[in-house]
Image (tube, rainbow, N blue to C red):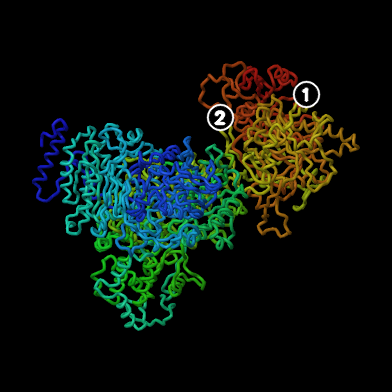
């Protein structure tokens, strides 16, 4: 034996390990030695991993299908298939067997002949003359039973398609060419006549293949293919399939075909009616994927009495919707090719489509055609025979590696190449195998060619479960790299065989093989053995037997040398020989074929009863096994089982015992709430059964938002902002002013009520302004839509709303979005449920394209949304926070989330009764029953047993104590608790809920009926309720229980009934929860037990298993968890445990809603109508309303501001503008950033965020985790973390997806959130029927995914998100306006003139009597020098400013104000009304604007100025052009006397720079839509930007020389132009007979930051007691019209309005009019002010300068004090952002340049600056004047004298303004001594004589400023300054510009 290794194995390590193993096995008396391959390849600690690994069959293949998984979709191949029938037979396993009866033994003779015995074969009648009637064609039909022949038929050509596959009439008309019989109207009839012998529904499209044509010899021969529309791409899934499995059954599965019951049929249901029926069946009972597709061979019915098709977890799929609607399919032959990989039809079928619960929508009643024999009884089974079908041979890629069948691309269509097969490779499946052995063997495909199967193929199942583990050669290079492998590390077939053996040998008796486990073993082996030792053929059997020997007989090895069939045949025969051989039946038989030709091949035969059943059932999708169960119930297959349960465990007749006990009670019932089970009369009023109301505390509902929910809501908001900011134009948040939403939920009535209740309680409808408080309660249900048949009409209405409201942002919330993500294309009715609806709704084009619609998918199990083809960007996923840092120190009454991982961890707590349990006694009973009833689905057996257990438990506790020993302790404890809990001390009659999960509706109804019946007979009907929890129905509860619930709630309403499970809080009840999946319903706190004993090995995907356990997840008291954990160290890795709880007294709670006492205002003006957004509270300013103080928190604001644009009035600016200057807002010490509002309804304990909860008065209201009772299979997977078993998170994530690679890295428990999503996106792909299968490659930009564990509070989080999203949009609709207290109120002048406060217009005489207030009091001039006047306060209030302080404006106080309908807007505003005003219409592009030059001579500039106007076509009516229409002559002006309702006479000029986006230039709403003339005055270089943003505005472009000028230049040019235009208009209108003085002389000069106008509300004389008045918004139009209608208006030089501040509301002005400075918004008379100019050089204070000059010229300025202007704080543009930098860029001077550096000595070497001279001068004077005028600092009695100009010299220095013009009005300066003299660019009116009138302090200083050095000297000489002032050479300065920038020069001197 040693020699056989020579030259084969070089590895000493291998030999040593081998010998050690042999030695160990010889020595060990009974212990299993460790298999040799474990020693070699698996690290020691990995060994236990394998030992007890998973035990449930995989539900569906995950990964590539065994034999292919790839399909040929090539039309060529599909067509050619037919020719190659004999040479390349179809694939074993890919097709289904012909059902029994497809042909008789003697039928061999009749094949090819018609029923009259005439030959129809083309070869024999090709040369015979055939009579073809007119309009008929000869066509060739193919029979699967004689694939080599073509049968000749004559068919009416109207029923055949044209060359495009179209225009074939539905139906059929044909003649038999053999016997000449005519007029067959049904193809079914015709196919019977010509003996096609079909196993399936006959279809003309399938069987009429070719046109027959005559060749050159005149003989008939095969012509072109008949072009049926589906023949090119048809997948056999949908049409009926013959038994001839031609290779055209082409595996068109894109990957394993469609799971969960969907056919991916490419046909619409549009064929002929019969066809339609056949297809309907395929669509309704659609196929599954390979894993399931290979499901089971149809079982052989043992007796003729089984007339219907047994739907036991049965056979390899019958491909297509077979017409075996009622046949017993003793399939004649099943080749492996019949494991169809095609997404084909059902794996079993209900007895009759008509009976099927799902058939009604499509085909109610018997079919209209074809089925003469509709009922099964009419079909007679025929004995089976064999039809040769070839087997698969894998394509050999490289010797020694495990061979894959097809290319590595996961979805590429690969072709499996069938090989001809030798005669011996066939296996006859023995008759009655299932009956004789009690097991239906499962063949796990391994590597190599499986044989054909003849005979009773229904008795075996072929499963591809493990096949992908052997496909490592298919790994792509990139996958290998990810896994850390090289291509030379591939395992040989021999290694694979030994690893498989080792794996099977270690599985426990209650475990089944799991694909994921074996894959990990294979991966470890590949990683662990780079040198892959070779194993010779002679060594393999010996090593294999050695590996099997450690299994203790559960694994056997059979070695054959010819084919695998030999071994399979031998094993099956030994199995069928009967019970005497079965004592030693192995669980697994590994069959190895050591063939010299093909190399080693192997497969695994599973014979263990539990394992074979579990694997077979695991291949069915949920839909299929539910259908299977309903089939078993409908057909009465369960009667044997049911009769078994008619007796109790003691052998008595159950019903008789119950009736006997009922009689004994004599109609008395057990009174609840008593200490023990005592009797009481039935007639007692149920109401009195409830505990007295005073003892029962009322249940109050509180809806709270917890920190975790707030964090999630903010993350969602932050993500929405980043979508908006991404620059992709996918979302424009600036345009929305409203939020609306719709929640889509799975089809569950209870879930609809629950969600609607959350919406009601959260108050979100009121907060969003969608409903008012009165209607919100009734209307909440319309915001929730079930995904059922009615969804389309509701969605249409919703989408209509979306289209009609482009300025509302809609959010479509798809809750529980993992439920039913089936593609709409494969959408069908499955087990009574419509499928594919979600896809139709959420992925329809309308939803994808709507720019104002966000889709938010919410899921606790998002894995199915996270595949390689996901539609959601990974960046748009928001995961529930997994931090448990909040949990560190928590008070004992806090609640923490207790989730799936906590349940797994709880197994290590070491407590006596764990909360996650497996009921082993129950499992033992189940095993016994499973062995007795191999024909039934295990869930049926489990259900019957469960019902019996509950029944007997009730009896044991009341009538038959002797039954106690026969009930499992778990069941007994639950029922005892259910009955007795309400009567315990302190329970106040409250009890527990027990949830029993029964997925099958029929079984659930059976259970409810049975338990209710037993309860009533035992007299327990008042003790607890038994309810069916079905998604399809509402809750129904008897009246007495409803009364109890009402009493507990203190509910007066007689009509009230419970709508949600939470409404049942405290009610003792059993809920039997049915339905395919749990749909996310929340259960009350009183739920104590969750019975999941029916959830077994059919639930083998992560989602299926976890969502069942998710039913028990909830919030529990911290101390419960902590106490339990005392025995073990706490685990840090738990990522799912979020702890949304706060410290004591920091309860986050939403007040009831707007109408309630606890309402919180949003912090803006009361009228903005927004309530309680927790987000809003983060930035509140002191509230102006009377609500209680808010707690302000800013810590989390960053997440919000992150994505905002400044133009949206971003939060950033507001936050920076006033860091929480709120005296009434104490900071709270929150542990999380959020806000709270003290509310009367706060309860003493924190409620879980998951839902409304009920406050408990009792102190002991600890909330414990619910107890979960599982089946063994589920328990092993969930306890995997603590045991050696694979854990649930390693399973395939969802049945609708599959693994993209045969091997992949192990997913660990710590992989959560984004990492887990990345893993699934890399390693899973959507199956063909998944909604994302054909998702576009571009992700949907407006789609988000919120994932969080079950029952954690996601609903509350997304409702909060809606609220803060709205709040943010409102925030975008709010502006920060300046809110500085007005100084003038403190020092309001007292004059003799008093005008009544309610006077509307000024009297000119009164105004003349008012003194002019020289000092500019507006807060914007706080940093400017005060102007000296007689009434000045003698003391400075300004603190002295240190030299060199930055000149930037100090922060001014702002307040957030909601925009009213009269606001001016920036470029980001869009709405229906004004889009034509501001947005370019596509037709009117920019070219539609005409450019006009306008020239005039400016006396001030002394030269001609040319301005450019851009005038849009629509605005040309405001201008006068010459006759040619090309030359602009003037701007039209109205007359003073014109009166019109809508007329606005004054043109509005807005100088603007740097604010093309942010300037408030949209006056449409401010003007109430009235026609007005608005001209933007812009610099030349900015003109293109303004044209882009404001294409419909008139632009006045300043000459290029003003590009760097300040605002003074713009104002100067506006005034010059306006005066020149006034003259032109006077001249023009004078010609028309109008007096010159009648032309309107006013213009409006308005800043680009004026946002709102307000006035005092007209009072009815009843002013408020505190002297305050209400302020209301008015439009700019109203303000202007008011000003323009002032009496004697032409006599005023300027009119203006007051600046708003919040203090104005508290005090009405004493005088409605003032004479004072006007700015920002001015009505200017250009006629009167003709000789007063704005200083065109100025950057700042140009308005003060101008006002002083106008006033000193004797003109009137009048301010209307009853109107206020709000100015928006705009942080950008407007010359504010002018950066002074060095002229030469080479000079790297990082330090900022301070104002003292703005001037220098002439000709000095100082750094020269790149800034205008005037700008430098003004800033220098503002900052450094204390050096120039030291005597003036803080000295108001001795101001600086400034002649003809006002320049700000800093707020510490007062300025006395004197006008040098003759006849000007000046301040009386008698007795005033000045501390300095400022002469700025003085003109010829300033003469030396004027200066001699003023007196100066000794040491006073002088500053003379001129344009250049020469004029400086001339001025000094001309004014004879040297007489009184002393100058030094070094006192001459210049601004620090270079000479070409024309610096200004100034000289300083001292008074002598």
Please name the residue that numbered disc 2 is placed on: 1444
Residue drawn at the location 68% of the way across and 17% of the way down: 1909
Instruction: Read off the residue under disc 1.
Output: 1504
Q: Among all residues in the image, which is located at the extreme left?
A: 27
Distance (Cα) linking label 2 and label 1: 42 Å
Residue sitting nearer the eye, 1483 or 1598: 1483
* Horizontal relation, residue 1594 to residue 1771: left or right: right
Q: Nearer the viewer, mark 2 or mark 1?
A: 1
Neighbours of disc 2 within 10 Å: few (<14), some (14-19), many (20+): some
Quick one: 93 or 696, which is closer to the camera?
Answer: 93
Whether residue 1507 is visible to the viewer of this picture, yes or no, is: yes
| Residue furthest front as drawn | 129
Residue 993: image location, x then y, percent? 37, 66
Check contact, mark 2 vs mark 1: CB within 8 A. no
Please state the horizontal and vertical placement of residue 1329, each as a whole percent of the image: 44, 48
Dot 1, how many residues are within 10 Å of its Cα: few (below 14), some (14-19), or many (20+)?
few
| The quarter of the displayed image where residue 1676 is located | top right
State which quarter of the image contains the N terminus.
Answer: top left
Whole-percent x, y for residue 563 in the image: 24, 42
Q: For the residue labelled by badge 2, is the local secondary structure a helix, a strand or a loop?
A: loop
Q: Residue furthest right?
A: 1633
């Amino acid at each position: 034996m040693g020699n056989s290794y020579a030259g084969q194995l070089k590895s000493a390590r291998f030999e040593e390990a081998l010998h050690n193993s042999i030695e160990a096995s010889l020595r060990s008396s009974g212990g299993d030695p460790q298999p040799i391959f474990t020693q070699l390849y698996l690290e020691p600690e990995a060994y236990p991993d394998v030992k007890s690994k998973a035990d449930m069959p995989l539900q569906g293949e995950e990964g590539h299908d065994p034999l292919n998984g790839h399909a040929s979709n090539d039309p060529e191949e599909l067509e050619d298939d037919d020719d190659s029938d004999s040479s390349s037979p179809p694939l074993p396993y890919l097709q289904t067997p012909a059902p029994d009866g497809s042909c008789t033994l003697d039928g061999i003779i009749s094949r090819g002949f018609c029923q009259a015995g005439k030959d129809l074969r083309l070869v024999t009648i090709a040369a015979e003359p055939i009579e073809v009637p007119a309009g008929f064609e000869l066509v060739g039909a193919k029979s699967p039973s004689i694939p080599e022949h073509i049968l000749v038929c004559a068919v009416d050509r109207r029923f055949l398609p044209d060359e495009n596959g179209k225009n074939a009439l539905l139906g059929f008309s044909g003649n038999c060419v053999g016997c000449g019989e005519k007029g067959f109207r049904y193809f079914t009839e015709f196919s019977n006549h010509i003996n096609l012998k079909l196993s399936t529904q006959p279809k003309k499209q399938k069987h009429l293949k070719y046109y027959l044509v005559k060749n050159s010899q005149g003989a008939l021969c095969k012509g072109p293919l008949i072009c049926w529309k589906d023949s090119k791409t048809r997948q056999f899934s949908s049409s009926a399939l013959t038994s001839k499995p031609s290779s055209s059954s082409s595996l068109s599965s894109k990957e394993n075909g469609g799971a969960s019951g969907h056919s991916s049929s490419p046909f619409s249901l549009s064929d002929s009616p019969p066809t339609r029926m056949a297809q309907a069946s395929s669509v309704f009972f659609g196929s599954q994927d390979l894993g399931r597709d290979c499901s089971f061979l149809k079982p052989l019915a043992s007796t003729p009495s089984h007339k219907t098709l047994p739907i036991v977890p049965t056979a390899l799929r019958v491909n297509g919707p077979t017409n075996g609607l009622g046949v017993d399919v003793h399939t004649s032959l099943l080749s492996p090719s019949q494991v169809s990989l095609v997404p084909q039809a059902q794996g079993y079928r209900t007895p009759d489509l008509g009976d099927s619960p799902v058939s009604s929508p499509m085909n109610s009643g018997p079919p209209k055609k074809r089925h003469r024999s509709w009922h099964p009884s009419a079909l007679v089974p025929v004995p089976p025979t064999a039809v040769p079908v070839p087997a698969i041979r894998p394509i050999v890629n490289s010797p020694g590696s495990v061979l894959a069948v097809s290319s590595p691309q996961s979805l590429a269509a690969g072709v499996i190449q069938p090989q001809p097969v030798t005669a011996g490779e066939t296996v006859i499946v023995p008759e009655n195998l299932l009956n004789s052995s009690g097991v239906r063997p499962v063949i796990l495909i391994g590597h190599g060619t499986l044989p054909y199967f003849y005979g009773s193929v229904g008795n075996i199942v072929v499963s591809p479960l493990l096949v992908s583990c052997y496909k490592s050669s298919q790994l792509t290079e990139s996958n290998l790299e990810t896994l850390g492998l090289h291509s030379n590390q591939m395992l040989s077939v021999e290694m694979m065989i030994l690893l498989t053996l080792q794996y099977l040998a270690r599985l426990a008796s209650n475990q089944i093989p799991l694909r994921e486990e074996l894959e990990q073993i294979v991966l470890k082996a590949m990683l662990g053995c780079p040198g892959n030792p070779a194993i010779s053929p002679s060594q393999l059997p010996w090593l294999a037997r050695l590996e099997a020997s450690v299994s203790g007989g559960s694994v056997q090895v059979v070695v054959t040398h010819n084919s695998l069939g030999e071994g399979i045949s031998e094993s099956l025969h030994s199995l069928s020989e009967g019970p005497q051989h079965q004592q030693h039946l192995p669980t697994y038989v590994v069959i190895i074929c050591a063939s010299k030709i093909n190399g080693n091949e192997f497969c695994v035969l599973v014979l263990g009863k539990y394992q074979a059943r579990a694997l077979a059932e695991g291949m069915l999708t949920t839909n299929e096994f539910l259908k299977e169960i309903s089939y078993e119930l409908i057909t009465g297959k369960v009667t044997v089982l049911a009769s078994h349960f008619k007796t109790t465990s003691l052998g008595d007749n159950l019903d008789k015992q119950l009736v006997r006990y009922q009689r004994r009670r004599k109609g008395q019932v057990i009174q609840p709430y008593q200490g023990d089970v005592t009797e009481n009369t039935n007639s007692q009023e149920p109401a009195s059964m409830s505990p007295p109301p005073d003892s029962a505390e009322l249940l109050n509902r509180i809806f709270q938002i917890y920190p975790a929910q707030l964090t999630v809501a903010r993350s969602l908001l932050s993500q929405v902002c980043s979508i908006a900011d991404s620059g992709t134009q996918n979302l424009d948040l600036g345009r929305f002013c409203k939020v609306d939403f719709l929640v889509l939920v799975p089809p569950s009535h209870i879930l609809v009520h629950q969600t609607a209740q959350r919406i009601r309680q959260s108050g979100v409808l009121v907060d969003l302004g969608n409903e008012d408080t009165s209607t919100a309660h009734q209307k909440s249900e319309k915001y929730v839509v079930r995904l059922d048949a009615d969804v389309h009409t509701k969605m249409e209405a919703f989408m209509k709303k979306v289209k009609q409201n482009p300025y509302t942002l809609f959010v479509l919330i798809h809750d529980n979005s993992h439920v039913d993500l089936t593609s709409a294309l494969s959408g069908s009715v499955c087990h009574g449920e419509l499928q594919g609806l979600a896809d139709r709704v959420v992925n329809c084009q309308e939803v994808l394209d709507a720019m104002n619609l966000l889709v938010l998918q919410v899921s606790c199990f998002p894995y199915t949304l996270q595949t390689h083809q996901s539609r959601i960007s990974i960046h748009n996923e928001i995961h529930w926070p997994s931090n448990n840092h909040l949990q560190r120190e928590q008070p004992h009454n806090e609640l923490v989330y207790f989730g799936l991982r906590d349940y797994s961890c709880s197994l290590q707590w070491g407590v006596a009764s764990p909360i996650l349990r497996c009921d082993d006694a129950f499992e033992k009973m189940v095993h016994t029953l499973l062995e007795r009833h191999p024909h039934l689905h295990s869930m049926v057996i489990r259900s019957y047993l469960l019902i019996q257990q509950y029944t007997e438990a009730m009896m044991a506790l009341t009538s038959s104590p002797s039954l106690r020993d026969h009930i499992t302790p778990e069941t007994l404890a639950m029922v005892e608790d259910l009955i007795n809990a309400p009567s315990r001390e302190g329970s106040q009659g409250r009890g527990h809920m027990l949830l029993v999960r029964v997925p099958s509706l029929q079984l659930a109804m059976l259970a409810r009926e049975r338990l209710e019946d037993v309860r009533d007979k035992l007299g327990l009907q008042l003790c607890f309720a038994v309810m069916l929890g079905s998604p399809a129905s509402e809750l129904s509860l008897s009246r007495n229980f409803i009364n109890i619930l009402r009493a507990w709630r203190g509910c007066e309403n007689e009509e009230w009934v419970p709508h949600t499970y939470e409404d049942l809080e405290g009610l003792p009840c059993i809920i039997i929860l049915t339905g395919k999946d749990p749909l996310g319903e929340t259960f009350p706190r009183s739920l104590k037990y969750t019975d999941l004993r029916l959830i077994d090995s059919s639930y083998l995907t992560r989602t299926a298993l976890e969502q069942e356990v998710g039913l028990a997840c909830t919030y529990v008291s911290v101390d419960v968890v902590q106490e339990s954990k005392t025995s073990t160290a706490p685990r840090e890795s738990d990522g799912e445990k979020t702890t949304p709880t706060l410290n004591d007294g920091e309860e986050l709670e939403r007040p009831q809603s707007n109408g309630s006492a606890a309402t919180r205002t949003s912090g803006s003006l009361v009228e903005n109508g927004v309530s309680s957004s927790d987000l809003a509270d983060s930035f509140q300013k002191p509230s102006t309303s009377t609500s209680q103080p808010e707690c302000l928190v800013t810590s989390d604001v960053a997440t919000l501001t992150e994505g905002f644009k400044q133009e949206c009035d971003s939060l950033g600016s507001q936050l920076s503008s006033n860091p929480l200057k709120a005296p009434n807002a104490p900071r709270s010490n929150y542990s999380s950033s959020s806000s709270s509002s003290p509310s009367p309804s706060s309860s003493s304990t924190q409620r879980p965020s998951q839902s409304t909860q009920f406050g408990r008065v009792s102190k002991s209201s600890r909330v414990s985790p619910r107890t979960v009772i599982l089946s063994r299979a589920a328990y092993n997977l969930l306890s995997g973390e603590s045991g050696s078993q694979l854990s649930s998170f390693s399973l395939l994530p969802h049945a609708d997806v599959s693994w993209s690679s045969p091997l992949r890295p192990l997913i660990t428990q710590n992989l959560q959130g984004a990492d887990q999503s990345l893993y699934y996106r890399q390693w899973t792909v959507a199956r063909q029927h998944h909604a994302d299968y054909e998702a576009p490659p571009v992700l949907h930009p407006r789609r988000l995914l919120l994932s969080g564990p079950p029952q954690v509070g996601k609903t509350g989080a997304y409702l909060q998100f809606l609220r803060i999203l709205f709040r943010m949009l409102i925030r975008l609709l709010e502006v920060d306006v300046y809110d500085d207290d007005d100084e003038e109120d403190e020092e309001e002048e007292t004059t003799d003139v008093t005008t009544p406060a309610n006077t509307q217009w000024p009297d000119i005489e009164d105004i003349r009597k008012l003194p002019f207030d020289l000092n500019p009091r507006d807060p914007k001039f706080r940093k400017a020098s005060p102007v000296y006047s007689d009434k000045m306060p003698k003391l400075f209030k300004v603190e002295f400013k240190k030299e060199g302080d930055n000149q930037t404006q100090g922060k001014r106080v702002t307040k957030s104000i909601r925009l009213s309908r009269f606001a001016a807007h920036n470029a980001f505003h869009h709405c229906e009304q004004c889009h034509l005003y501001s947005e370019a219409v596509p037709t009117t592009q920019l070219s539609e604007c005409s450019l006009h030059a306008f020239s005039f001579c400016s006396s001030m500039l002394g030269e001609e100025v040319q301005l450019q106007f851009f005038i849009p076509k629509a605005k040309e009516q405001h201008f006068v052009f010459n006759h040619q229409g090309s030359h602009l002559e003037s701007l039209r002006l109205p007359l003073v006397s014109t009166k019109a309702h809508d007329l606005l006479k004054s043109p509005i000029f807005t100088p603007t720079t740097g604010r093309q986006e942010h300037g408030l230039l949209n006056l449409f709403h401010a003007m109430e839509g009235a026609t007005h003339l608005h001209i933007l005055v812009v610099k030349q270089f900015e003109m293109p930007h303004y044209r882009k943003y404001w294409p419909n505005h008139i632009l006045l472009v300043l000459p290029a020389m003003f590009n760097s000028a300040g605002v003074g230049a713009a104002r100067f040019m506006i005034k010059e132009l306006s005066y020149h235009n006034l003259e032109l208009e006077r001249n023009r209108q004078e010609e028309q007979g109008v007096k010159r003085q009648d032309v309107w002389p006013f213009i409006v000069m308005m800043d680009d930051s004026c946002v709102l106008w307000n006035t005092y509300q007209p009072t009815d004389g009843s002013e408020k007691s505190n002297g305050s008045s209400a302020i209301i918004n008015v439009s700019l139009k109203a303000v202007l019209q008011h000003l323009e209608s002032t009496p004697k208006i032409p006599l005023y030089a300027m009119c203006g309005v007051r600046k708003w501040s919040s203090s104005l509301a508290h005090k009405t002005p004493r005088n409605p009019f003032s004479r004072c400075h006007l700015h920002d918004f001015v009505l200017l008379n250009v006629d009167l002010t003709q000789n007063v100019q704005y200083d065109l050089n100025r950057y700042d204070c140009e308005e003060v300068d101008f006002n002083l000059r106008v006033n000193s010229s004797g003109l009137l300025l009048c301010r209307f004090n009853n109107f206020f202007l709000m100015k928006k704080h705009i942080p950008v543009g407007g010359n504010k952002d002018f950066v002074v930098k060095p002229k030469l860029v080479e000079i790297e001077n990082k330090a900022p340049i301070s104002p003292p550096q703005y001037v220098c000595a002439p000709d000095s070497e100082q750094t020269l600056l790149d800034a205008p001279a005037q700008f430098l001068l003004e800033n220098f004077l503002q900052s450094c004047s204390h050096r120039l005028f030291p005597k003036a600092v803080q000295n108001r009695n001795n101001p600086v004298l400034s002649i003809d100009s006002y320049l700000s010299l800093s707020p510490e220095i007062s300025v006395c303004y004197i006008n040098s013009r003759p006849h000007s009005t000046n301040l009386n300066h008698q007795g005033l001594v000045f501390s300095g003299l400022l002469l700025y660019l003085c003109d010829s009116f300033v003469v030396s004589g004027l200066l001699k009138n003023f007196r100066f302090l000794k040491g006073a200083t002088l500053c003379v400023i001129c344009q250049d050095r020469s004029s400086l000297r001339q001025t000094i000489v001309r004014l004879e300054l040297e007489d009184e002032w002393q100058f030094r050479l070094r006192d001459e300065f210049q601004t620090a510009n270079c000479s070409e920038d024309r610096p200004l020069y100034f000289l300083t001197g001292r008074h002598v």
